Image: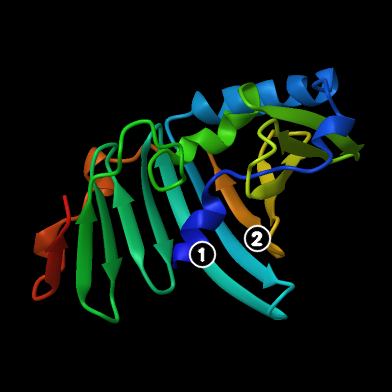
């Protein structure tokens, strides 16, 4: 699970010196993509998460769903559920019948703390380049300005008609590539605030580990 969470975290680096300036076309597309997503009442996605480790020669696929509302989210995977209400995180493992409560540090831009950062990272600390323009989608690469980053790159595929996210590919220096393949993308859902917090009444008889 740590690999999955880190995968959603925010990444990138390759050929940084080769692309010293932002590609204006890429920035324009990302501006529209970001405005559409962050201006919606929520962002809901169903996806397949594929992790390929070239060093170990392994491939792992996990299906799930997520709903985001600013810095709040609920992530459902086959082996756990994570809620984050902007301050507190609950990580529930059904097989273990256990939920762990943590309070992430302020200023942490990892996925677990601020998942909406995926839609605005390009604005600071990264260079963007439009790799390919098709009739129905754009392919954009983002590279970190920090050469010490443990990530190589993030590659986004964005629908040209509805500015919807088609896929995200995260590439790491350690040989791991994580691809989020979006199956459904919805900006119309209006979530209840309680959806982003763990409800003890719904999960009776489980162990609660409070690490705050």
For marks 2 and 1, give the CA distance: 9 Å
Query: Element type at marker 1?
Result: helix
**Where residue 115 appears, x then y in whole percent?**
46, 41
Q: Which residue is mark 2?
A: 178
Which quadrant is the N terminus positioned in? bottom left
Q: Can see residue 172?
A: yes
Residue 9 vertical position relative to residue 118 in the rendered view, above or below: below
Q: Which residue is mark 1?
A: 3
| Residue 136 found in image quarter | top right
What colouring does the structure picture have? rainbow
Nearer to us of marks 2 and 1 is: 1
Residue furthest front in the image: 148
Residue 152 vertical position relative to residue 161 in the rendered view, above or below: below
Label 1 near label 2: C-beta < 8 Å?
Answer: yes
Left or right placement of residue 160 versus residue 188 in this view: right
For label 1, the crowd category at 10 Å Cα-Cα, with few meaning under 14, some 14 to 19 and many 20 or more, is few
Query: Element type at marker 2?
Result: strand
Residue 196 vertical position relative to residue 58 in the rendered view, above or below: above
Left or right placement of residue 197 versus residue 110 in this view: left
Left or right placement of residue 47 versus residue 169 in this view: left
**Where residue 31 appears, x then y in whole percent?**
67, 21
Residue depicted at x 51% and y 62%: 4
Q: Can see residue 188?
A: no
Give the number of the disc on residue 121.
none
For label 2, the crowd category at 10 Å Cα-Cα, with few meaning under 14, some 14 to 19 and many 20 or more, is many
**Where residue 103 appears, x then y in whole percent?**
23, 45
Q: Foreground: 22 or 145?
A: 145
Residue depicted at x 68% and y 72%: 53
Residue 77 vertical position relative to residue 24 in the rendered view, above or below: below
Q: Earlier in the sequence, mark 2 or mark 1?
A: 1
| Residue 194 found in image quarter | top left
Q: Foreground: 149 or 138?
A: 149
């Amino acid at each position: 699970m740590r690999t999955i969470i880190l995968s959603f975290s925010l990444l990138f680096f390759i050929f940084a010196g080769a692309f010293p300036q932002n590609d204006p076309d890429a920035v324009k597309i990302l501006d529209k993509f970001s405005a559409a997503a962050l201006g919606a009442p929520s962002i809901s996605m169903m996806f397949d998460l594929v992790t390929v480790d070239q060093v170990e020669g392994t491939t792992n696929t996990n299906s799930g769903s997520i709903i985001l509302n600013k810095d709040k989210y609920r992530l459902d995977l086959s082996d756990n559920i994570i809620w984050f209400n902007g301050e507190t995180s609950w990580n529930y493992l059904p097989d273990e019948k256990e939920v762990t409560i943590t309070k992430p540090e302020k200023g942490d831009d990892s996925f677990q703390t601020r998942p909406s950062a995926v839609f605005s990272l390009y604005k600071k600390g990264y260079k963007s380049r439009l790799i390919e323009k098709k009739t129905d989608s754009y392919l954009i690469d983002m590279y970190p300005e920090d050469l010490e980053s443990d990530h190589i790159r993030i590659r986004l595929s964005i629908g040209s008609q509805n500015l919807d996210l088609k896929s995200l590919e995260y590439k790491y220096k350690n040989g791991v590539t994580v691809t989020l393949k979006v199956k459904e993308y919805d900006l119309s859902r209006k979530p209840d605030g309680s959806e982003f917090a763990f409800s003890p009444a719904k999960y009776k008889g489980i162990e609660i580990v409070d690490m705050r």
